[in-house]
Image (cartoon, rainbow, N blue to C red):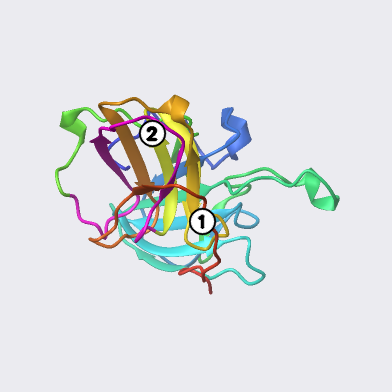
Amino acid sequence: MFESLPEPIEKEFPVNMEAVGQATGLILYRHIITTPVSGTIKTGDKPRDRVLVYVKKTRVGVIDGTYASPSTVDVDLKVGDVLDILVENLGRVNYGPEIVDQRKGIVGNVTVGASVLSKWAIYSLPLASPPDSTDDKMTPNPSATSSPIFFTGSFDLDKVGDTFLELPGWTKGVVWVNGVNLGRYWVAGPQQSLYLPWCYLRESDNKITVLALEPTGTDSFVRGVTSRSWGNNPDPDAP
């Protein structure tokens, strides 16, 4: 993902997703360290919703606002380090007292210990369409332990028809087929397969893109099945 980012929006301090005209998907905040800092990282007033923290493109922790006691992430940042904060919008409620507090991304300042970080590049990633998968942007056989990462492939069919996609070995992310966003997959469930109607398919040269937000095993694959599957599993990142 980090190699296929759009043009950034430059801000002195982070702004929330809606402030950049975005309603869904992911938003990435990038800061280059100019003064050494260390301590617990805090992303605004609270995690909105699932926050993945990377230092020099290596994941160092997850802060999930859906948990009563989200995990904390401690960092030790040196001059020149690149801090990436990827925030996933998990959806909005449309009822009750929380309806007035549904802004996503980062609301407030990012701090590490007592230090407030300024000068941010903000990347809007609504995920309506997959990234351009031209050959010069793709890496053959990327490390399965890398994330976030886009995997692409193609397949042919003997006959077009409705199906459901299962993703054994994958943990969390998004799937597109022929440019159409089918939705999110998450091993936590309850949905363990994604509906793929016949109208999005063709007999030859179907393109599939899978965004893996979590490291995935080398034996992960995607398959079509005849019925929807359900199930609940522990979230691997649960505190």
**Amino acid type at image mark 1:** Ser
- Closest to the observer: 165 or 113? 165
Percent position of residue 213, x then y: 40, 52
Give the quadrant of the N terminus: top left
Give me the residue at 41% from left, 59% from top.
171
Whether tag 2 and tag 1 are in contact, CB under 8 A, the answer is no
Majority secondary structure of the magenta segment? loop
Could you tell me if residue 125 is visible in this image?
Answer: no
**Amino acid type at image mark 2:** Val
Give me the residue at 62% from left, 34% from top.
18
Q: Left or right: 230 with respect to 95?
A: left
Could you tell me if residue 2 is visible in this image?
Answer: yes
Which comes sooner in the sequence, label 2 or label 1?
2
Q: What element carries label 1?
A: loop
For the residues labelled 2 and 1, the Cα–Cα distance comes to 19 Å
Give me the residue at 40% from left, 47% from top.
31
Residue bounds of the magenta highlight = 142-170
Percent position of residue 77, x then y: 35, 62
Residue with the mark numbered 1: 229
Answer with the quarter of the image where residue 6 lies: top left
- The crowding category of the residue bearing disc 1, from other C-alpha atoms within 10 Å (few below 14, some 14 to 19, many at least 20), is some
Q: What element carries label 2?
A: strand
Nearer the camera: disc 2 or disc 1: 1
Residue with the mark numbered 2: 177
